[in-house]
Amino acid sequence: MASMQTNSNLPTWQAELFVPDAGVLTECPRWDERTGRLLWVDIYGGTISSCDAAGRDRRSMSVGQPIGSFAPRASDGYVLALESGLALSGADASTWTPVGEQRRLPSRLRSNDGACDARGRFFAGTMEHDEEPHAGAVFRLDPAGPVGAAPDPVRVIEGSSVSNGIGWSPDSTRLYYADSAELRVDVFDYDLGTGALSGRRPLASYQMSDGYPDGLTVDAEGCVWVAFWDGGVVRRVAPDGTLVGVVRVPVDRVSSCTFGGPDLTDLFITTARYQMTAERLREQPASGSIFRCRPGPAGRPVDRYAG
């Protein structure tokens, strides 16, 4: 395990504005190679939005309630982590069907960040609206079976507080996971054959002055890029927990990141203006926008839900 360290010789990049005013609480950026578009959610706006590779041609779909995350499906449409629980949709996410309705989330909880593994399983966490410690969990949704048979989500991580970024090493032997309230990014051993987690341990720990680890992505070299809420940065962390690079973002509330673009070398970074004071917004008017930089390393194609 390694704590955040300061090193003046670290590679440092500056993110630039890409999509202005993308939402109030933008999260879960995803690059869709099939369409050449960047997608993201506005959590409390209840929307999935998208734009083209130049940041133009913006479109939006409303899901009718808060949405924490989503992933494209292998066939068509999306798997959705909604306030009420998990759901599946077609290409129009405005119409969706609940999954495992007998396990709908209690009203005090909502879904948060999520992602798919290389076998098409969807993992998504939950959190309490007021961020009560250890009230949430992370669920795994296995690929859907025959038509009409909805899989039941399986609880795989207990006692999460503010469940956030989820990602896998390129060889799928490790799962990385951020719980913002714990100020830590953890790593698990991962069994791709079964979807089982084991051997949880800290990858990197932080102080409140560093910001709160939020959404994350893993590049093709196996390094983890972690967005820091109230930190104004994305940090690149090596598999041994060493800090190996920093992206500076000109607003504080950095929420998540993903690689995309034609060669997967654009790092897209979502931010938020959620619960910011009027004074702070005057100081950081681009809060809630999406930023971009090209740090050099490439990302990997998004994994799709296999159901």
Image (cartoon, rainbow, N blue to C red):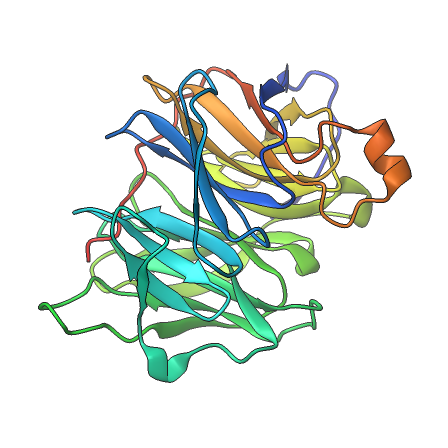
Residue at x-position 42% and y-position 23%:
57
Position of residue 31 in the picture relative to residue 244 (left or right)? left
Position of 97 relative to 279 (above/below): below
Instruction: Name which quarter of the figure residue 270 lies in.
Output: top right
Q: Position of residue 61 (x, y in %)?
A: 42, 45
Q: Position of residue 36 (x, y in %)?
A: 31, 24
Residue at x-position 22% and y-position 52%:
119
Residue 111 in sight from this viewpoint: yes
Residue at x-position 46% and y-position 52%:
69
Q: Position of residue 287 (x, y in %)?
A: 71, 33
Instruction: Name which quarter of the figure residue 123 lies in.
Output: bottom left
Quadrant location, the C terminus: bottom left
Position of 144 relative to 2 (above/below): below
Q: Position of residue 93 (x, y in %)?
A: 34, 51
Residue 175 in sight from this viewpoint: no
Closer to the camera in the image, 211 or 23: 23
Closer to the camera in the image, 153 or 3: 153
Position of residue 88 in the picture relative to residue 110 (left or right)? left
